[in-house]
Image (cartoon, rainbow, N blue to C red):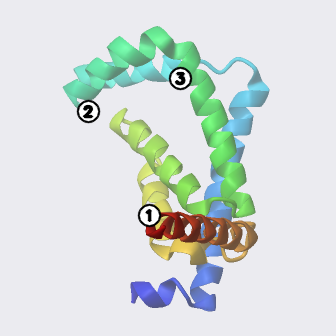
Amino acid sequence: MISKSRQSKGAAVVFFVIRLYLGYTFLSAGLGKLMSGNFDASGFVRGALARLEAGVIQSWWGDFLETVVLPNAGIFSFLVMWGETLVGLALLLGAFTGFAALMGILMNISFLLSGAFTQNLIMIVLAIVLLIGGSNAGRFGIDNWIMPSLRSKDHNKRARNSKRQLI
């Protein structure tokens, strides 16, 4: 079944719709933060730490938020704003779809671990569906042109290296 979803044109249409939904969601969240000009992740982190006291989040994650993220809130604010924006753009364009989906999963897992349960789990599941789809998830996007070119360059490089080893 998975192998068929990696080749089927019908499955590619489903992946396209999922990509557009996730891309729009990430891009609008990222641009909203960028355009506001005053996004600060420390408020979110403090809210997560309050959930730690209520037992909603794990203590190891709370320790990470308190010792690593909160003191470096400026860096993490930058990473969240630009991460959401770039993941959204990549998914909308269908460029490096698998990598973008993986980065979206990582961001959503960190939000989920922080106690933000709204739509993060749904977004994780949809991004996993894109990963399962493999190259077919980017069939109606830039990946349709980028990936074959990268594969042929990689193939040519491997062929040159194997010839050198024979000599």
Q: Quadrant of residue 98?
A: bottom right
Picture coordinates of residue 106, whole percent (x, y):
44, 45
Q: Residue at x 34, y 12 (%)?
A: 67
Picture coordinates of residue 55, whole percent (x, y):
21, 28
Q: Secondary structure at mark 3?
A: helix
- Residue with the mark numbered 1: 128
For residue 56, the mark is 2
Earlier along the polypeptide chain: callout 2 or callout 3? 2
Q: Secondary structure at mark 1?
A: helix
Label 1 environment density (alpha carbons within 10 Å; few <14, some 14–19, many ≥20): some
Q: CA distance from mark 2 to mark 3?
A: 22 Å
In the image, residue 79 sits, relative to residue 70, either above or below, namely below
Q: CA distance from mark 2 to mark 1?
A: 25 Å
| Quarter of the rendering occupied by the N terminus | bottom left
Earlier along the polypeptide chain: callout 1 or callout 3? 3
Q: Residue at x 63, y 59 (%)?
A: 96
Identified by mark 2, the residue type is Val
Residue 56 in view here: yes
- Residue with the mark numbered 3: 76
Identified by mark 1, the residue type is Ile
In the image, residue 87 sits, relative to residue 5, either above or below, namely above
Identified by mark 3, the residue type is Phe
Picture coordinates of residue 12, whole percent (x, y):
62, 81
Tell me if 145 is positioned left or right of 156 in this view.
right
In the image, residue 137 sits, relative to residue 105, either above or below, namely below
Q: Give whichever of 117, 62 is nearer the camera.
A: 62
Earlier along the polypeptide chain: callout 2 or callout 1? 2
Proximity of marks 2 and 1: CB atoms separated by less than 8 Å: no
